[in-house]
Amino acid sequence: MNLKALITDRLEAGLARAGVPDADAIVGPATRPEFGDYQANGAMAAAKRAGVKPRDLAARIIADSDLAGIASSSEVTGPGFISLRLDDDFLAGALGETIEPVGRGTRVVIDYSHPNLAKEMQVHHLRSTIIGDATARVLEALGYDVVRQNHVGDWGTGFGRLVAHLNDTGEDSEALGDLERFYTQASGRFETDPAFADRARQVVVDLQGGDSETLERWRRYIDISMSHCQAVYDRLGVSLRPEHVRGESAYNDDLDDIVADLSAKGLLTEDEGALCAFLDEFKGKDGNVVPIIVKKSDGGYLYHSTDLAAVRYRTGTLRAERLLYIVDARQSLHFRQLFALAREAGYDRGVSLEHHAFGMMLGADGRPFKTREGSGTRLLDFLDEATERARELVQAKNPSLGAAEMDRVARAVGIGAVKYADLSKNRTGDYVFDWHAMMSFEGNTAPYLQYAYARIRSLFERGGVDAGSLSGTPTIREPEEHALALQLARFQETLEQVASTVMPHHLCTYLYDLASAFMRFYENCPVLDSDVRDDRLLLCRHTAETLSQGLDLLGIETVERM
Ligand code: ARG
């Protein structure tokens, strides 16, 4: 049940009956405790429209709305707010509801992770991977048909020197174990060794000409580079698999056709030998339109060309109804141009094209975050460090865990902390990476939520209770029980909010508020030695289930003890 949508429906029906149809009820969680559980602010604007007093209209809306069985009290507060307190039995009845598959039948493409395979995966790809994966999981839980598209950078002239270098080194696993060094070596030779540079340029010609042996070499390099990425995905526990990769090169055969099609549609102009699209909305500072280059004067294609083909593939062949691009904010102009041109060409087929940008990850010094320099895959080393730090943290808290369990907990907490630190911030801003803050058991962190979950599990263990055997609907008595049940009932509306905004931090905030509501309940309402023990145990059980389900949707594991 989407609580907010339900209340909105009822109040808007009331608004219509009160004589103001098509007005927005503007419903949300109450901003202050004295405003109840939910508040609606729409009466003010609607009253203006209807030329009546806001408080009077608010009172009429309440009288005309069917809130029976939902709200236990409704009143006008302030200048004309409607304040609702939800009914205890209604909230109790909503506990344990499964997620409603509101997305069933709708296909959504999510373009995320998409590293450039010439080099190692970079930090901003890590952000895309983490945010994209959580989004994919939430959408899937809501029943959407999610198609993951890992649009890796696997084509372009840069691969000439890499393949040429690979031809010389052979598949020396030592050299290829560190792609960053391999890349630097190849670039260095390209700069200083003219014979090598010639060979590298020939490789580019051969690749573009479709020479099978060269393509095979290139494919080997891609496979090796991709296996490095897969190792990071596996360590992170994200859901990306090789079958989700559809890189730039997958569109090579479509590019001539894209150009022909854009030309036929009158969208291309030749400018100094290059084929460009001039769209009026992209004016530079001098007032001149900035061209979108689709084909270079040397015949080469660019990032835009491939992306146009990808839009056409996703809306046409895949028949997606929404395309989500989880890409850092520096590419905003690229996507604005891409979407505008795709619309002009009709490739969007009227579906929603969305760039969901994110800011940078900064180090404590406020500069772009850097993983440690050195050998090996840097992101893997970084994730190892997270696990080691988590181990120290957990060891201090609970030294009695056995070695195997400690390994599992350290991994769950370490990886969980890295992901959660990223997911819990509004993605549009930059965020400062801070080991201490993210590894803390206090505050809006993964360890705090994982600990809250483990604490409920240990409660069941201490009481010798089998959580699965509890059934029925609890009676709600105390304010802390009410607040907890209310928060539990907001799960669906939160997931739908994440799906529409592609902002996983809403789910993080929700889970943090849930854990906090639980802690308040737990401090004020004894559970095991209470004479309403089963009612309270049911609340505990639903809290544990929602915490673990919510964390799972963020790609974060829970553990039974820590
Ligand atoms: N590989 C690109 C980069 O690292 C990101 C690709 C984003 N997706 C897309 N369809 N353009 O900058």
Image (tube, rainbow, N blue to C red):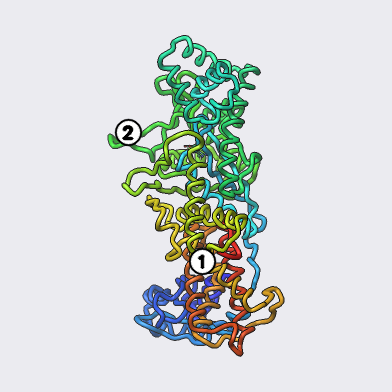
Nearer the observer, 356 or 241: 241
Q: Which residue is mark 2?
A: 288
> Residue at the location (64% across, 17% down)?
213
Residue located farthest toward the bottom when viewing the structure as drawn: 531
Q: Secondary structure at mark 1?
A: helix
User: Label 2, label 1: how many angstroms apart (C-alpha)?
Assistant: 49 Å
In the depicted structure, whether residue 451 falls above or below residue 105: below
| Crowd rating for badge 2 (residues with CA inside 10 Å; few <14, some 14–19, many 20+) | few
**Residue type of the residue flagged with mark 1:** Leu
Q: Is residue 201 left or right of residue 315?
A: left
In the depicted structure, whether residue 61 falls above or below residue 490: below
Q: Quadrant of residue 550?
A: bottom right
- Count of numbered circles on the image: 2
Q: Which residue is mark 1?
A: 511
> What is the x, y in percent for residue 270?
44, 23
Image quadrant where one finds the N terminus: bottom right
Q: Is residue 137 visible?
A: yes
Q: Is residue 260 left or right of residue 444?
A: right
